[in-house]
Image (cartoon, grey):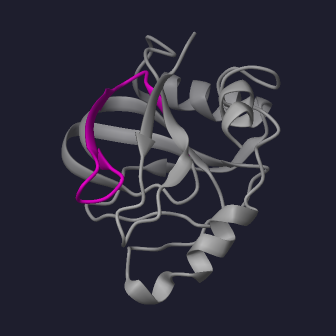
Amino acid sequence: MKPEKLFLKDDGSIPNSKLPLLVYRKVTDETGETAAKYFEELFAKNNWKNSWRNGVFDYHHYHSNTHEVLGIYNGRSLLQLGGEKGEKLEVFAGDVIVIPAGVAHKNLDEEDFAVVGAYPEGKSHDMNTGKPDERPAADQNIAAVPLPGADPVLGKDLGLRKIWAEIS
C-alpha cells in the first residue's frame, strides 16, 4: 500500500512541514464502530496511542509538538490542509491521513464524518491556529519532533519510516 503524498509549504502564518502529509486510501472497507475499533487497534499496535474519536475542527489548527494520524471511520469530509493557501482533500470512511507536526487542517464540509485520532508514542498535542505570537516557538517545537518509530498503518519499516527518513 503506497500513500499519496502532499507537500505543504510555510505560508507565513502556518509553518507546515518539509515532510509530506500522507494519505492511505481504503485501509479498511468497514465503517462505523467496526472501523473505529479497527483503527484504534491498528494504531496502538504501531505505537500511535492516546487515541480519541470525534471529527476535525472547522478552523485551521496544527500541532507543533507531535505528528497526528486520523483514521476516517464514518462518512466523508472535504478538508483543507496547510492553511488558507493549502490543498483541499476529500477523504472517505476507510482512509487514513498522517499529518506531520506543523501542518494545519480544517474541516470545510462533511457528511456523517467521524475519525479516530492518535499520536506517536501516545504524546499529548498542543494547539496552534496560526497567530503571529505562536512563532518562533512553534518552529522550534516542530524541528524537535522526532521521526515516529513506526508508520501507524504499515508498521516499523515501511510508509513514513522510509518516506520521511529520506527527507529528514
Q: Quadrant of the N terminus?
A: top right
Q: Quadrant of the C terminus?
A: top right
Residue occupying the point 35% across, 30% down: 74
State whether residue 106 appears in this view.
yes
Q: Which residues make up the magenta segment? A: 80-99
Query: Residue 28's x, y, as percent?
Result: 49, 14
State whether residue 2 is above or below residue 74: above
Closest to the observer, 46 or 148: 148
Q: Check if residue 159 falls in the magenta segment.
A: no
State whether residue 124 appears in this view.
no
Residue occupying the point 47% across, 57% down: 16
Residue 153 in the figure: left or right of residue 98? right
Residue 154 in the figure: left or right of residue 77? right
Q: Main secondary structure of the magenta part?
A: strand
Query: Residue 44's x, y, as percent?
Result: 74, 36
Closest to the observer, 75 or 163: 163
Residue occupying the point 60% across, 24% down: 38
Query: Residue 125's x, y, as percent?
Result: 62, 65
Corner quadrant of residue 7: top left
State whether residue 40 is above or below residue 25: below
Residue occupying the point 61% across, 82% down: 137
Closest to the observer, 54 or 118: 118
